[in-house]
Amino acid sequence: MEPVVRIRNLSKVFAHGGTDVVALDHVDLDVDTGEFLSLMGPSGSGKSTLLHIIAGIDRSTDGECRVLDSDITDMTEDELSTWRREHIGFVFQSFNLIPVLTAFENVEMPLLLTSLSRRERAEHVETVLDVVGLGDRMTHYPRQLSGGQEQRVAIARALVADPDMILADEPTGDLDAHAAEEVLTILRKLNQDFGKTVIMVTHDPKASTHATLTRHLDKGKMLPL
């Protein structure tokens, strides 16, 4: 079976103050369908950069990146935008919820670009909010939720369009230990019970224990297994 992510000889170089900074240095990586992969490494190791390239949010400088059997390095910005919307659910460390929208409205946002009716959108939103345990918080605004609840709303938003992959960038970085455990349990549930491929960036060894496979980056290089 073809890996859901196939990366070969991938590099990313940033220009900074007239100097080239190597964020990723000839990285190879395969991720199988249904994997829960944890990408670990110290700050500045390139793990978030790699996740953003897999998500089509950033572009590599060189190398091959095939995701879901598509070569995303050759896509135009419009093609990437459509591809992300159809296949990728992204969870940010800082939640990225819109303060003036309720939990329901925040989760519904990705569906506004689809052809679903209002009733169908409502059914999708209610289902995923139930999955993350917030069916009773639909009308709450972000300021009325705890940090852990905000992140669970963000996960519901990432899940609502039924993407093939969930990509999470330090999803527990701003949470206390209890809220972090709740979020990690949900990600593991999405992987085990719903068959979602999950790739999570983390610096926390405890968070990494929830994954089925952990890979380590250091100074832009992928360390061997």
Image (cartoon, helix red, strand yellow):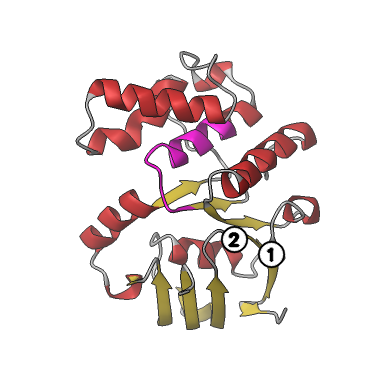
C-alpha distance separating marks 2 and 1: 7 Å
The residue depicted at 57 percent of the width and 16 percent of the height is 144
- Tell me which amino acid carries mark 2: Glu
- For label 2, the crowd category at 10 Å Cα-Cα, with few meaning under 14, some 14 to 19 and many 20 or more, is many
Q: Is residue 61 visible?
A: no
Q: Is residue 101 magenta?
A: no
Q: Position of residue 143 (x, y in %)?
A: 55, 19
Q: In the rendered structure, are the residues bearing label 2 and label 1 in contact, judged by CB atoms less than 8 Å apart?
A: yes
User: Which circle's residue, 2 or 1, is located before the other in the chain?
Assistant: 2
**Disc number placed over residue 35 in the picture, else none:** 2
Q: In which quarter of the image is residue 162?
A: top left
Q: Is residue 62 placed above or below 131 in the rendered structure?
A: below
Direction from residue 41 to residue 151 in the image, left or right: left
Q: Nearer the viewer, residue 45 or 91?
A: 91
Q: Quadrant of residue 109?
A: top left
Q: Where is residue 94 in the image (x, y as percent from the top left)?
A: 56, 40
Q: In which quarter of the image is residue 101?
A: top left
Q: Position of residue 190 (x, y in %)?
A: 57, 44
**Disc number placed over residue 213 in the picture, else none:** 1
Q: Does the magenta stretch include residue 162?
A: yes
Q: Give the range drawn in magenta.
A: 151-165
Q: Is residue 151 placed above or below 188 in the rendered structure?
A: above
- Tell me which amino acid carries mark 1: Leu
The residue depicted at 52 percent of the width and 51 percent of the height is 196
Image quadrant where one finds the C terminus: bottom right
Tell me the element at label 2.
loop
Direction from residue 125 to residue 144 in the image, left or right: right
The kind of secondary structure the magenta stretch mainly shows is helix
Q: Can residue 167 be seen in this view?
A: yes
